[in-house]
Image (tube, rainbow, N blue to C red):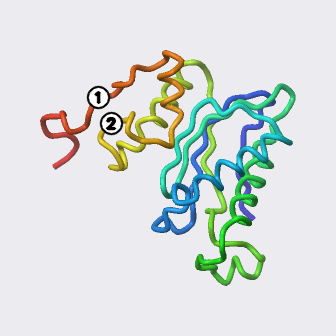
Amino acid sequence: MVTYRRNFIPGGSLFFTVNIEQRNLRLLTKHIAVLRKSFKVVRATHPFAIDAIVILPDHLHTIWTLPPGDADFALRWRLIKSCFSRSLPHEEYISASRASKRERGIWQRRYWEHTLRDERDFATHADYIHYNPVKHGHVTRVADWPYSSFHRFVALGICSADWAGDITSWHGEFGEP
C-alpha cells in the first residue's frame, strides 16, 4: 500500500487543491449552496479558518488555518466530501473499485496539500487561488468570478478590485509556440 507523506502541524496554515472525479460534471458550482452548507456543518463541529478560497466547476483551492493544537485536516476533508456527496442524487458513474468499497464517484480520493511556510508563501498561494478562474478561462477579470474570497480581500482593502487587470487587455505572445 502506498503511504502518503502529510505534514501535520497543529494550528498550521495549509493550501489545498481538491478535485471532483469526473471533471466534466461541473458539480461544485452547480451545487454551490450544498457545498457551502457542507463547509458550514463541518466548521461547526471541527473549526478552522478559511483564509482564502475559490470554487471552480470541477475543483477548488483553499487556504485553511487550523486551531492551535489541532492538525486533523484529513478528518475535515473527509467530512466535507461526505456531507456534499450525501446531498446529491446518485447520477455519477461509479467504478467497480468504488462500488466494492461502497464509495460514491464524486470526489477524487486524494487531494493536494501544502503547508505554508511564511507570509510570502501565503501571499503567493492566495494570489494563485484568486487568479485561478482567469487561468481556466471562466472570466477575464478576477473580480468577475463570484465564488472566490477575492471579494472579501477587496472589502478588507488587501486587494484592489482591478487586481491582475483584464486578460482581454494583454498584448503579445506568451509561452512556447
Quadrant for residue 92, please give it. bottom right
**Residue 22 drawn at (x, y percent):** 52, 69
User: Dot 1, how many residues are within 10 Å of its Cα: few (below 14), some (14-19), or many (20+)?
Assistant: some
**Label 1 to label 2: alpha-carbon separation:** 6 Å
> Looking at the image, which is closer to me, 91 or 69?
91
> Looking at the image, which is closer to me, 72 or 25?
25
Residue found farthest to the top: 157
Quadrant of the image containing the N terminus: bottom right
For disc 1, the marked residue is 165
Give the amino acid at mark 2.
Arg
Do the numbered discs 1 and 2 sit on residues whose CB atoms are within 8 Å?
Answer: yes
**Residue 133 drawn at (x, y percent):** 40, 44
Q: Secondary structure at mark 2?
A: loop
Q: Considering only vertical position in the picture, is 173 above or below 69?
A: below
Residue found farthest to the left: 172
For disc 2, the marked residue is 141
